[in-house]
Amino acid sequence: MTQDPLVIFTPTGKRGRFPVGTPVLTAARQLGVDLDSVCGGRGICSKCQVSPSFGQFPKHGLTVSEGALSGWNAVEQRYDEKRGLKPGRRLGCQAQVLGDIVIDVPPESQVHRQVVRKEAALRAMEMDPATRLVMVDVAEPDMHEPTGDFERLARALSDQWGIAEVAIDLPVLTRLQPALRQGEWRVTLALHQPRDGAPHRVTAVWPGFFEGPLLGLAIDLGSTTIAAHLTDLATGEVVASAGAMNPQIRFGEDLMSRVSYAMMNPGGDAEMTAAVRGALATLAAGLAEESNTDQGRIVEAVVVCNPVMHHLLLGIDPVELGQAPFALATSSAMELAASDLGLTGLAPGARVYLLPCIAGHVGADAAAVALSEDPGASEDLVLIVDVGTNAEILLGNRERVLACSSPTGPAFEGAQISSGQRAAPGAIERVRIDPVTREPRFRVIGCELWSDEEGFAEATAATGVTGICGSGIIEAVAEMRMAGLLDASGLIGGADRTGTPRSVPEGRTHAYLLHDASTEGGARITVTQGDIRAIQLAKSALYAGARLLMDEIGTDTVDRVVLAGAFGAHISPLHAMVLGMIPDVPLDKVTSAGNAAGTGARIALCSRSARAKIEREVQRITKVETAIEPRFQEHFVAANAIPHATAPFALLRAAAPLPDLSFNSHGDADGGRRRRRRTG
Amino acid sequence: MTQDPLVIFTPTGKRGRFPVGTPVLTAARQLGVDLDSVCGGRGICSKCQVSPSFGQFPKHGLTVSEGALSGWNAVEQRYDEKRGLKPGRRLGCQAQVLGDIVIDVPPESQVHRQVVRKEAALRAMEMDPATRLVMVDVAEPDMHEPTGDFERLARALSDQWGIAEVAIDLPVLTRLQPALRQGEWRVTLALHQPRDGAPHRVTAVWPGFFEGPLLGLAIDLGSTTIAAHLTDLATGEVVASAGAMNPQIRFGEDLMSRVSYAMMNPGGDAEMTAAVRGALATLAAGLAEESNTDQGRIVEAVVVCNPVMHHLLLGIDPVELGQAPFALATSSAMELAASDLGLTGLAPGARVYLLPCIAGHVGADAAAVALSEDPGASEDLVLIVDVGTNAEILLGNRERVLACSSPTGPAFEGAQISSGQRAAPGAIERVRIDPVTREPRFRVIGCELWSDEEGFAEATAATGVTGICGSGIIEAVAEMRMAGLLDASGLIGGADRTGTPRSVPEGRTHAYLLHDASTEGGARITVTQGDIRAIQLAKSALYAGARLLMDEIGTDTVDRVVLAGAFGAHISPLHAMVLGMIPDVPLDKVTSAGNAAGTGARIALCSRSARAKIEREVQRITKVETAIEPRFQEHFVAANAIPHATAPFALLRAAAPLPDLSFNSHGDADGGRRRRRRTG
């Protein structure tokens, strides 16, 4: 008795015997092999391409003959003529099993393919999109057996795809009838299933066969800026990115001023909700236009944001987030219709997923950072700092993860700094000060040259030198400290102590002249004593938050530090450490994760299992509330010194000069600060 | 060893033993006895009132002592002082079981109480509302264990009510935080559960304890008129009713003209959708105002309507319903957010239920009639006719139910009749013609007197006699037939044959002068030959539809006839039969069901099990499509005669004079009609 042919799929190794003549796609489905198909085996979509292997396979104890698969049929011939089939490829729905065979499913034919994240040291993520394309042939209406078009569609999904339960929202239902008739009873559906076993939902319909791709929006909704990435839901690739200012800025620069606006102005929350929803809709439309695609292909969006943005986007008054106990209206992940958020330009049934919030001050953006950086999977103790107007801080390893937020204020973004400006061409972003001459050199955004290099003046003539941005001020302050222009308490020395005319008096304090308009052109840019104080406040808050988490876990050291946030990507680890923004670790243990929140949004957009994972993870995260923790104040005060009043920062001191000097005896009024420094 | 006390609940007879001290409500819940409670046993809502019985109960083998329940406690004392506890009543959550006891649950304490329907011979229906009130005490937020307010609400529902899965729509979520704080962490929720075992959904929230009642809207959305009944969801009582013209009338009088409007005018369907949604919102607001209640208490609506109205309400282009094969976009029952239909004034999460459509021409209104009249439960074969611009016809018994619709046109509503008008004061609604003198008498809407009674002129002076409405024209034509003024073919005799000057010439035909303006005041009202033809067309369509169903079932007779529709309530069975609108049955077997579609809507509003039932039933109903059935034309032609060309109508002839005469020899041109009559 001869056995049915053995079919082995790689890379999974799944195997089974199938009768002669079984299409490869059918065999794959029966074995649960991840082989894509939109048209359901009709030879239209070409998604089910496979690579058969022939010859000896000692590992499998198999010899595959050339005749193990049926030859090309007319469908494959036509496909190859029209669109070209790669060498060695077959259409899984057309090629039939004739003998023992080994069949490789290439990554692009897998729904759950692994894709590499360009950020974060090329880590991989697995595609597991919630929405897929499915083509169906629907029975025509029969007057004698009257049923609705949707009911016949549901029957077709059951018969042709084994999908038992399907829902449809009204805006999609209204488009079903014309699509069915235009496609002559063949349509392609976008089917959304939030998790395995859940009912499916039709979120878009196209007449006939629609090739895709389906698109999604990963949105990082910040207090100041909104970034959106239009993403291919099959490959995970970003098709186009765009950013916009958050129009809520006109209601208040930071979160608490927006909460205040809502409290003081009846209907103020609704105004802010309308503003941010409008901005998202505009961004979506702009991205579609930029990438020359139809917004109707955008079937999903994922939004990450802090709790105040979260509430304002949902239309919930954020007033409770402005006062203890900082109660969220809801903390769970949310799955909504895009139209509920005024995103009506997308696919008619498009869905929006919001990551869970961790606490009243630690939002879905922090959850997204956790998803991207995965501290809960780290062998060593990692501190992740998402630097922004509000800093989200995560600390943990495989055993435990903690989270808090800390109100750093906008100084790190160049606001509240005398010569500060947003990161834009003309802004100083890199600073070096010669420790001997105490002369500065710098680079501005938009020019690769340092200011002491030839051609700098010409190269920056168009933009000028206009101010100093967040990373620039951090480097400037740290360089001043290393060059002996600034003491540990944060006092700027006068020219008599520093020996450089760039130490200029300013009232009862001093400033450091970074760029002299009169001799060098452009704006006069100084780092004032007030700037130093603003940076001290911000970095103290950041450090104190991190330190609070370290207390909670019972440690004085962390193994590594990840700087996240769009701004985090531009911070120099050495300078951040000199400032004492982060605890003392070896410099090579400080890395940047880029916009980790945005990356987390993109991961959640592409993967249902990632959504499920972060929903589980946030339950495990210990939330620490900085606002009411007395030790936060202690840590804050101790962190005021540069780099720190009590922590030794031994690793840092081995790597960078931190002159031990004090400018305090020269008449500065800050007696309290002096006392504290002396006890340190 | 003494046993725990035995508790027997009546009327169900459910029984069980419970430890001494068990509250009656707890015992009832554990036994699955239907005992209402909103506050969950906190002695606030008083919904759990019971009547304990004492003394000998030989039937149960029980003697109940006076001490079998605990005495009144402070909660009951206070409740009695404030609101008065009926004699013999106890609060089930306060009274504790001390000994063997028999406890009656009065109907008003049952959620699933039986209520009597005033319509349809006092049939009962069981309350089984999809929405109920539930009070919960929610934990306050804790900064150290941050969870959202909604998550703590869900926890409270699980702990206090055993409700495991609960969802909330955005518009309700936005109101949760202020309600929780205003109610000091106690809120009452409207909880919607479409069927047992389905997840619950919070559709409204009130601070503290909210007594209700919850209200629902039963809406009968007709082509011409819209009727809405504001209904108490606990008792099923109609609190207020209102009607309005369907504003879509300006786009076309009948359904097909509205479909044409949508076809001819891009965006025309959206215009009609907006018009009808606006009308529903206005009706809801008006009903709330009229009954001096808050629209926010309206948590549900049920809509019944024909398929074209169904699609236009949902925002679906009805064009497919205007041409074979009359495909519905969807035929299933629908459960939607009221806000999806623009009903935004109701409770923030209010739900709308649409009954299933039976076929492209037989809508949710016919399903509602089936729900109200339940032909599938009838022992005898019942024909149900819902008379309107389009007639819905149901025929069936326990074995089988069939349905069709028939395009009767608007003649039965007084339209397309020379002196026709809508049913309004001044319209003739009753007509009698003396078979000897052939003089008419009539009654008009708004006056109880007949026109030959003393004081009629004075009583109708205000309104005048303005025209003839639907029931009036039916009676007029039937009376003319019985009085020998009209022959079986539908010809009106001239004065030379009828011997009355009221037979007046009109062109080449004759008319019957019902009301002479010159001698009697008011309008000149005649029944013209054209009017007779219009009525013949309408009644032939109706009869042919019924006859088609009888063919399908293989019968020449039905056992009884139910006239439904607001207009059906006004039709005289005798006159309807003389006209041949309905098949020949004993006159006492013709009954009126009033507005059965509206009643069906109300039943569905009050009962989830009724919804489930009709969803099952419509699957069982055999749909007959009149538009393409060749026999329909045959039946239509044969039914043109009055009462019928071939059917004997023997029962009718025994009850009413139907003079055998013909006015055809006197020069009427209708030769074809003459031939057919003679063969009859």
Image (cartoon, coloured by chain):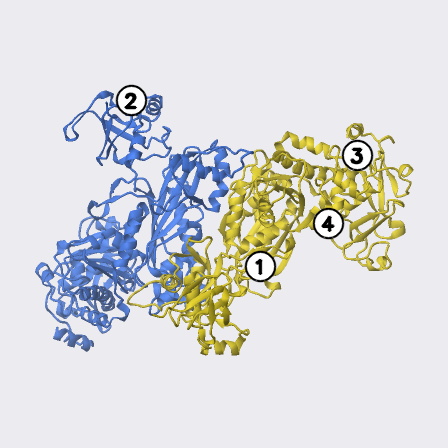
Chain colours: A blue, B yellow
Q: Which mark sits nearer the N-terminus, 1 or 4?
A: 1
Q: Chain of mark 1?
A: B
The residue singled out by tag 2 in the image is: A70
Residue A187 as seen in the image, left or right of residue B462: left
Residue B16 visible to an observer of this rendering = yes
In what element is the residue under mark 4?
loop
Q: Nearer the viewer, residue A494 or B207?
A: B207
Tell us which disc is closer to us: 3 or 2.
3
Badges 1 and 2: C-beta atoms under 8 Å apart? no
Q: Nearer the viewer, mark 4 or mark 3?
A: 3
Name the amino acid, label 4. Arg
Q: Position of residue A465 (x, y in %)?
A: 26, 55
Q: Are marks 1 and 4 in contact (CB under 8 Å)?
A: no
Tell if the residue under mark 4 belongs to the same chain as the one under mark 2: no
Residue A29 image point, x, y percent: 31, 34
Location of the C terminus of chain A by quadrant is bottom left
Q: Quadrant of the N terminus of chain A?
A: top left
Which badge, 4 or 3, is on the more N-terminal residue?
Answer: 4
Q: What secondary structure is found at the residue carrying circle 3?
A: loop
Neighbours of disc 4 within 10 Å: few (<14), some (14-19), many (20+): some
Instruction: Say which mark, if any, is on residue B414.
Output: none
Q: Which residue is mark 3?
A: B489
Task: Tell me if residue B394 comes above or below residue A414 in the rendering.
Answer: above
Write down the chain letter for disc 2: A
Q: Secondary structure at mark 1?
A: strand
Residue B115, label in figure: 1
Tag 4 and tag 2, C-beta contact below 8 Å: no
Which chain does the numbered disc 4 sit on?
A: B
Distance from disc 1 to disc 2, alpha carbons, whole Å, reads 70 Å
Q: CA distance from mark 1 to mark 3?
A: 48 Å
The residue tagged 4 is B422
